[in-house]
Amino acid sequence: MARAATATINLSAIRHNYELAKSMAPEQRALAIIKADAYGHGAVRVAEALSDIADGFGVACIEEAVELREAGVTLPILLLEGFFSADELEYISENQLWCTVHSWEQIEALQTASLKQPIKIWLKMDSGMHRVGIQPADYKDAYSRLSEMDQVSDIVMMSHFSSADEPEKPVTDTQIATFNQATEGLDSPVSLANSAGTMEHNGARREFQRPGIMLYGATPFMTSHPVADKLQPAMTLSSEVIAVRELEAGEPVGYGCTFVCDKPSRVGTVAMGYADGYPRHAKTGTPVLVNGQMSRIIGRVSMDMLAVDLTDIDDAKVGSPVEFWGENLLASDVAVHCDTIPYTLFTGITRRVHKKYI
């Protein structure tokens, strides 16, 4: 490996975070959500690392499930978006995937499908997020129709929260109440809680939790949280200084000359850019660690390189390590400076960044 841009993935941290999620409702089950290549951490490697403790996995679509099955993953896999065309149902049935159903069109396609074995269906309700899902008033009708199908083995009732990461808002309690009212009298397992729901909302912890971002050590909350504070960061994004410049006051740095030195400065160029997944819109002042010491991004991030301030780091030189986020600098803290969230930082890492697993 020549270029130093590396994402180091700590699989033990992911195991710790999954077990933390399980501890919130130890008598129930938790599907580890590993969609989007495990939020950029590597779905197959994460699934293998959790294979002896996980109750199953959640992915967005069939392509992600196929990758796992072909890699030898045998635990249950839930398709969180269900199927997009009826011809997927044969594979879903043969490979014993669990499948979300969120529309009447999917229900009708399922009813006319010829399957070798029935499918476990997760019937999704739109309890207030208004993205996908059966309307509460129609939910019992959809449940009844699925219950009568030979193509269906079991039903899990599910919904998704819009604002569980903002516990000060009453929205989540309203969604739970809507769900409870619409499912009254139905006897099936329930899944409501995402990461924030698992950590914060007692009423959301039902038979299946769905921890996602918390598995990777990032908090969904904007402020300190007693459970989130126990998470261990799983990804460390790093590179190294490849050049050093001594600049006078008034000298600009980078494209567009958006940063101008206000005093004599030492500037380091680092092998990391937006083509690696580091956000172009990171502002001057976004924190980084150089030789373990706090510094900052200066100027615009370019495709393959960016600049950091070395003025107050006397021992920095070509080859000095640079950490962009990880154990010592939380992704959630970096995200604030980039007007984004840790989810986009993790999932944005591109294939040219070397992944190292520990």
Image: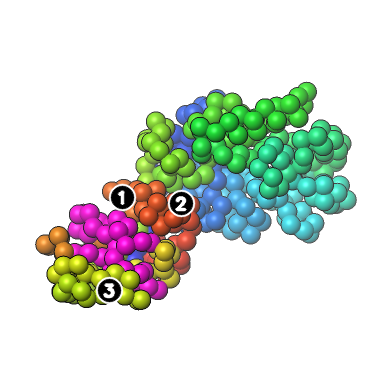
| Dot in front, 3 or 1 | 3
Name the residue carrying label 2: 341
- In-image side of 207 versus 37 (left or right): right
Amino acid tagged 2 = Ile
77, above or below 324, in the image: above
CB under 8 Å between discs 3 and 1: no
Give SS at disc 2. Answer: loop
User: Quadrant location of the N terminus?
Assistant: bottom left
Q: Earlier in the sequence, mark 2 or mark 1?
A: 1
Amino acid tagged 1 = Leu
Q: Residues within 10 Å of mark 1 (few under 14, many from 20)?
A: some
From the top left corner, tell me how far across and down residue 226 is, in percent: 39, 31
Q: Which residues are magenta?
A: 282-310
Residue 17: quadrant of the picture: top left
| Residue displayed at 71% across by 47% down | 132
From the top left corner, tell me how far across and down residue 116 is, in percent: 80, 49
Name the residue carrying label 3: 253
| Residue displayed at 76% across by 30% down | 182
CB under 8 Å between discs 2 and 1: no
Q: Earlier in the sequence, mark 2 or mark 3?
A: 3
259, above or below 39, in the image: below
The circle on residue 329 is 1
| Residue displayed at 59% across by 46% down | 58
From the top left corner, tell me how far across and down residue 201 is, in percent: 54, 29
From the top left corner, tell me how far across and down residue 203 is, in percent: 59, 26
Amino acid tagged 3 = Val
Q: Earlier in the sequence, mark 3 or mark 1?
A: 3
